[in-house]
Image (tube, rainbow, N blue to C red):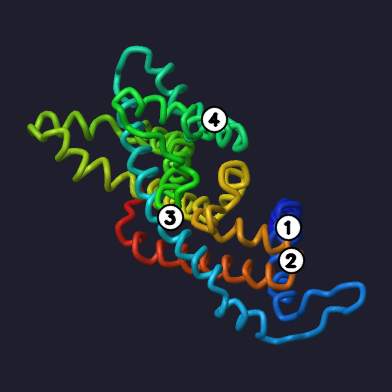
Amino acid sequence: MKHVYGWLLLTPAAILLVGFTHYPAAMTLFDSFFSTGTVVRPSRFVGLDNYAALADDPIFWQVLGNNFWFALGTIPSAIALAMVMALWVNEKLPARALVRMAYFTPTVLPMIAVANIWLFFYTPQIGLLDQFNALFGVASHNWLGDPDTVLGAVMLMVVWKEAGFFMIFYLAALQSLPPELEEAAKIEGASRWYFFRRVTFPLLMPTTLFVLVNATINSFKLVDHLFILTKGGPDNASSLLLYYIYQVAFSFFDTAYASTLTVVLLALLAGLAVLQFLLIERRVHYR
């Protein structure tokens, strides 16, 4: 009877999980083997033709490369900054609550609002960044219109928004650590850096694994900011994989090819998650 009661409690969540996660994923995989149907020409089975077209798509490979560099630039930066901020606000400092709120504020701002704020920073000539550079005689620069700087500009905005969110998890983990560990380290004469490297950081590894998985997922699901800031330009220099899927599905109305791209994205995220657990799980210390 207890097992039946437990399954009944899990049923609502299981229905939502299957209906909004597993079923759409299965149907997306199914649609990737068919062509895009129209009123005149119905959808038909094409096998692996969509995947063959994807392999020959230069925009896909460019977007995938953009996403690789985007993830490489944002994930370590956001996690490191979040850890530093958490260590800072965990100390006894004046106006600590105000500092915590200031760090967390970017997280609660809507994505569209954040994009518009940073658009004001990056606008040539009248933007705050160019106005600041003008004080030192630096010429105006189109940060979002230059293929060499647009991806870095978007990275900076994303790190600014996500670091405060990850800080909350690190702060919660730091506050759960036994204070006796730090007291014993002080008695033994251990430096703050040694204590962090040998005690604090290893005990934060479960949180780091959780944050790393979330940061990886976030680095592949950016759409709103690109829609406001760059629309993937110039010349797809800032386009990321999910934004390319959005374009293919809702601008080009090629739902079959969009399904193929989505399957690749899901497989890529699943592979990265498994790789992270295999490589980092050995270094995770659970108490």
Give left or right: position of 54 versus 171.
right
Residue 282 point in image, percent of width and height = 32, 62
Residue 191 point in image, percent of width and height = 11, 34
- Label 4, secondary structure: give it: helix
Q: Residues within 10 Å of mark 2 (few under 14, many from 20)?
A: few
Q: Which residue is mark 1?
A: 20
- Numbered disc in front, either 1 or 4: 4
Give left or right: position of 221 versus 152.
right
Q: CB of mark 2 within 8 Å of CB of mark 1?
A: yes
- Name the N-terminal-most of marks 2 and 4: 2
Q: Which residue is mark 2?
A: 23
- Label 1, secondary structure: give it: helix
Q: Residues within 10 Å of mark 4 (few under 14, many from 20)?
A: few
Give residue 258's quadrant in the image. bottom right
The kind of residue on which mark 2 rests is Tyr
Residue 245's disc is none
Give residue 181's quadrant in the image. top left
